[in-house]
Amino acid sequence: MLFKINSLLLFGMVPILMAMSTCQKDTCNGKKTFAAMQAQISNIGNEAAIYLNYELDEALPINYIKQIKVSKRDIDYQGNTWANDYALIKNIVVTPTQIVIHLNNLGAFNDTSPNWHFNLELPDRRGYINCDHAGNDDVYYFDIYTKTIFSEQNTKISSFEWKEFLNKGAI
């Protein structure tokens, strides 16, 4: 009887141990993308650009950061309503230390203090750095919030926040 119990335990544990040995540790998501970020704005007439000066928290190559794109979603990855002023964005340019968000015609915003929310996203890091993880591709979402004060003499961002959210791909 003792042999049967030991055999059952042994043979019952084999599939569990095999499954555990195939588990893959996530080596892609040890740190956030950005360690620090500051924002500035410049405008000439109705043209404006927001300059996001950044420091990376992870050793990520510039060709990865250049993959950043505008998210046109109004619902975040958790299903919550997400303020998103993506229609204001004309294009995005990335340098090794800066993300420049060029805005569309701002004639309607002159002499006001608009609050803007921009949602950006970066793809999975696999293929850009030496890392791997189980499951489908991850997506990194960035919620960018600015409160801007327009004037002919001194346009400025009076308040700025950024948050990063990782949406891990399904396993």
Image (spheres, helix red, strand yellow):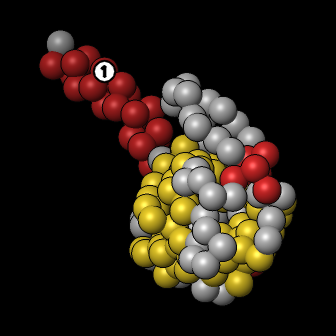
- Residue pushed farthest left? 2
- The residue that disc 1 covers is 8
Q: Is residue 21 visible?
A: yes
Q: Residue at x 51, y 67 (%)?
A: 157
Horizontal side of residue 10 vs 53, given as left or right: left
In this rendering, the answer to whether 43 lies above or below 20 is below
Quarter in which the C terminus is drawn = top right
Find residue 58 and report its horizontal and vertical position in percent: 49, 76
Quarter in which the N terminus is drawn = top left
Number of on-image labels: 1
Near-viewer residue (148 or 7): 148
Find residue 116 and report its horizontal and vertical position in percent: 59, 50
Q: Quadrant of residue 105?
A: bottom right
In this rendering, the answer to whether 79 lies above or below 121 is above
Horizontal side of residue 109 vs 26, given as left or right: right
Q: Residue at x 74, y 41 (%)?
A: 72
**Element assignment for label 1:** helix
Q: Residue at x 55, y 54 (%)?
A: 113
Q: Is residue 92 visible?
A: no
Horizontal side of residue 139 vs 26, given as left or right: right
Near-viewer residue (6 or 63): 63
Q: Residue at x 66, y 86 (%)?
A: 96
Near-viewer residue (33 or 95): 95
Find residue 94 and report its horizontal and vertical position in percent: 73, 77
Amino acid type shown at disc 1: Leu
In this rendering, the answer to whether 97 lies above or below 86 is below
Give the class, few, some or many, for how many residues have Cα within 10 Å of label 1's Cα (few <14, many ≥20). Answer: few
- Residue pushed farthest bottom? 96
